[in-house]
Amino acid sequence: MFIVHVFVHVKEERIEDFKKATLENARNSIKEQGVARFDVIQQQDDPTRFVLVEVYRTPGDPAKHKETAHYKTWRDTVVEMIEEERTNIKYSNVFPDENGWD
């Protein structure tokens, strides 16, 4: 599995707009063949901070995801909502193995 944590800092006045756009993207992303999980989490002590936990089946699947209409719509929609540039960290799974993600 190829796992990406995307860290997003959202403008305080745009939190609900960001959540709406991001949930729409997540709901469509989990329908992609190469996506095992697509979680959206919000920090409890700072609600302007989010992490997108994206679990892909292969290292090539994130590039395929970025070509989808729903990703491009999300990217273009949230650009004005973000306080600072998104960052990410890439991971490999240890447990569960590939079969445990479904």
Image (cartoon, helix red, strand yellow):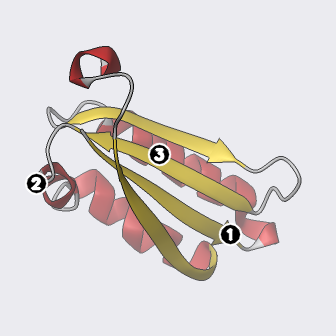
Q: Is residue 78 left or right of residue 45?
A: left
Residue on which disc 1 sits: 10
Q: Could you say where residue 30 lies in the image, as x and y percent from the top left?
A: 32, 32
Q: In the rendered image, which quarter contains the N terminus?
A: top left
Q: Residues within 10 Å of mark 3 (few under 14, many from 20)?
A: some
Inter-mark Cα distance, 1 to 2: 28 Å
List the single residue furthest toward the right: 45
The kind of residue on which mark 1 rests is Val
From what the image shows, is residue 9 above or below residue 55?
below
Q: Is residue 42 left or right of residue 80?
A: right
From what the image shows, is residue 34 above or below residue 2?
above
Q: Secondary structure at mark 3?
A: strand
Is the Cβ of the residue at disc 3 closer than 8 Å to that at disc 1?
no
Q: Residues within 10 Å of mark 1 (few under 14, many from 20)?
A: many
Residue on which disc 3 sits: 53
Q: Is residue 10 left or right of residue 30?
A: right
The kind of residue on which mark 2 rests is Gly
